[in-house]
Each structure stands twice: as C-alpha cells, then as structure tokens.
Image: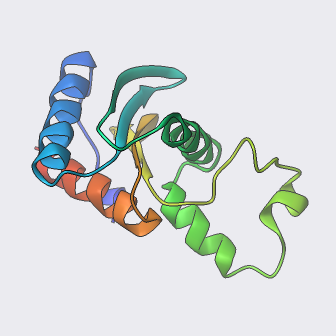
Amino acid sequence: EENGLDFASFGYAASWALGSSMVAQAMARSLPVAIAITFGEQRVFHVALAGASATNDDWLARKFRAVAKHNCSSWALACAQRAEETDYFTAGGYLRSDIALAGGAVPLRVRGSLIGAVGVSGLAEEDDHRFVIDALRAFVP
C-alpha cells in the first residue's frame, strides 16, 4: 500500500499542509500522539499533542531510521522481521536503541525517490501506521 503513495513534488509548504491536516484529525479524535515529518535527517514538522511524551519522540526517531535504512515503512519491516527465524538486531548488528521494529513511519517519496518519512507515535503500532497511510492517501493528488 505504501508503494502507491508517491508525489510529483513535496516541499516545506506541503509538509506544513500534511502535518497540519494530521494534527486536525488527531485532535478531533483526542489522540495522544506525536506527529513528525522529515526530509532526510531534517525534521521539518513536529507536534506533540496532549497525552504524548518525549518517549514518543524517541520512538519516532527510531522508526524514521528504519525507513531510511530499508526504504520501506517501519510497519512493513516489522511484519517482515516477525516472519523471519533470525533476530534482526543480532543478524544485522543493529542496536535496539537505534531502530524500532514497530509501525508508524512511512516513506515520503517524490517520483519514486525516498526523500524522508511521515510518522506517528502514541497508538498501537498498527494504528500508528494506519493513521499515517490514511493521511497520505487523502493528501496525494
């Protein structure tokens, strides 16, 4: 589902518009989430709503690293790793403090190229993922 989410262009104004739309949706549902958008390593949008904490920011950073490293959503990576017999962290030499195998961060692509990610933290991981996918689907022209 994430492969169909591709933009012809996506800049700072689009980041603000998408992030603001996500905040409005989360506030309307009183969701205790942190929402962020990155371009590469630069965080270009960030909001923490009532009930979210600094721990959610840590989760977002770890989920964004999963997207950047594997060019897929953190949910897709988590699901794929659950199906594997080997331990992702041991086999890859990764630290649990660096990468999260949990849903909620989705690649942000322009004409097929990974430029960043959109993420949510604060709900169950599948719900974090679904929130981002739904927001991106509504935003893709």
Q: Quadrant of the C terminus?
A: top left
Residue at screen point 52% across, 34% down: 54
The residue lying toward the viewer, choosing from 111 and 35, is: 35
Q: Position of residue 94 (x, y in %)?
A: 82, 49
- To which quarter of the image does residue 119 belong? top left
The vertical placement of 91 against 53, above or below, is below
Residue 72 screen position, x and y as percent: 51, 54
Left or right of 35, for residue 22 = left
Residue in the picture at 89% in, 51% down = 93
Residue at x-position 26% and y-position 17%: 12
The front one of 52 and 44 is 52
Q: In the image as oriented, which residue stretches furthest toward the front? A: 51
| Above-or-below relation of 126 to 92 | below
Quarter placement of the N terminus: bottom left
Q: Is residue 59 above or below residue 87?
A: above
The answer to which of 7 and 23 lies nearer the viewer is 23
Q: Position of residue 129 (x, y in %)?
A: 38, 60
